[in-house]
Image (cartoon, coloured by chain):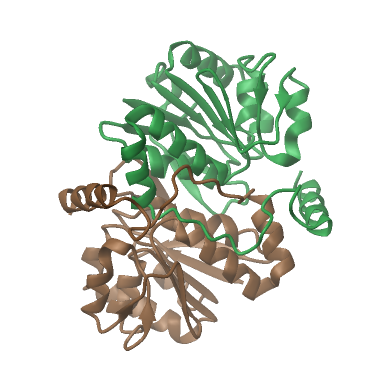
Chain colours: A brown, B green
Amino acid sequence: MDIAIPIFDRITALDAVGPYEVLSRLPGATVSFVAAEPGPKRTENGMLALQADRALSELPSPEVIVVPGGFGTRALVTDEAMLDWIRHAHEHSTWTTSVCTGALLLAAAGILDGLRATTHWLQYDLLRRYGVTPVAERIVREGKIITAAGVSAGIDMALMLAAEIAGPELAHGIQLGIEYDPEPPFPGGLPATAPPEIVELVRARADELA
Amino acid sequence: MDIAIPIFDRITALDAVGPYEVLSRLPGATVSFVAAEPGPKRTENGMLALQADRALSELPSPEVIVVPGGFGTRALVTDEAMLDWIRHAHEHSTWTTSVCTGALLLAAAGILDGLRATTHWLQYDLLRRYGVTPVAERIVREGKIITAAGVSAGIDMALMLAAEIAGPELAHGIQLGIEYDPEPPFPGGLPATAPPEIVELVRARADELA
């Protein structure tokens, strides 16, 4: 089974690597990191490069697509090569998924028209502009399309997807294999549950970066 | 603040990328991926390469060290260049940490002698061989040394470390920034809480790989 993760400069690494770590453990799965041009793609802060091994054109019809997010998505919402690849791949895919602001690329490609979807909680408005209804849920499923919330939500989404693809026993085994028994140090990893001053801190920092 | 993540072939990507995603968000932090020889380092399954930008020798004394795991650690427990780097870096570090089987490298470097530590639940015996007491906890702290359990535990460890370095408010902000409000699909991400047949499934699969 071919699983394609399109990557790009200014990506958020965990958006891609969380799902990779889960889905690459599916028996018979080949996860490929693809890009318009193969080569190293740097994260937003420039501190890490992930290697894109293959061109988008080499893998037009993977069974599963996982579109990660990051500030780099903002430039790609008008990049016809990327959007065409997503449209074509989605036509043939078994599952089309996104993590964080990867949902903006699905939206820009037109495949979320009129649907519910999620993205990073700071970016709900951007989704709305594409006629998509943003939902404050960790994972939103619309038929074969699954969108996950910010960054770390890709791990949960991929485990759920693994269960759909290979059954709950195997997915549970993968969860155990990556020892995913989370102990977040703070209660409140969501804007609705975190103290308002912490929410403001994150919002201000994001405004700075953007 | 210099944060070094030594990487190598046959690494487990999430071991490194989880902590990177958290620690790179600390104000003033520079996370560097280092290796004996800079260049792309492939994961165990060959499907992803992370780029090592700098040589170990270029960054001998980072404030923080995060040693990730993966099958590649087995070859490195006798690699004197890596072990010397760890020993020297640890002498000067503020925090020395590991994720998953990265703990084997700390143990082989001799810096866990007589201490408690954790690693992937499948590898407790390997730690014991180095005179280290393996502990079934997600995060184990011994002074300035922090070891984290398997793969995904590096995210929790890094958030705890972020709180030590920059205070709980900022660390909580990072948790919210990566929307870390986990919803693992299965209860039981630990061998003690998962059904025995799932534990056996994972154990058998690990034996195959090893």
* Quadrant of res B78: top right
Q: Position of residue A137 (x, y in %)?
A: 42, 70
Which residue is depicted at the point 44% across and 82% down? A90
- Please tell me which residue lies in front, B87 or B100: B100
Q: Quadrant of the C terminus of chain B?
A: top right
Q: Is residue B26 visible?
A: yes
- Please tell me which residue lies in front, B181 or B98: B181
Q: Is residue A40 visible?
A: no
Judged left or right of residue B78, residue B172 is: left
Which residue is depicted at the point 58% across and 60% down? B184
* For residue A117, above or below residue A37: below
Which residue is depicted at the point 61% across and 38% down? B138
Q: Position of residue A203 (x, y in %)?
A: 22, 53
Q: Position of residue B142 (x, y in %)?
A: 57, 20
Q: Quadrant of the N terminus of chain B?
A: top left
* For residue B49, above or below residue A165: above
Q: Position of residue A187 (x, y in %)?
A: 44, 49
* For residue B133, above or below residue A74: above
* For residue B65, above or below residue A60: above
Judged left or right of residue B73, residue A184 is: left
Judged left or right of residue A29, residue B96 is: left
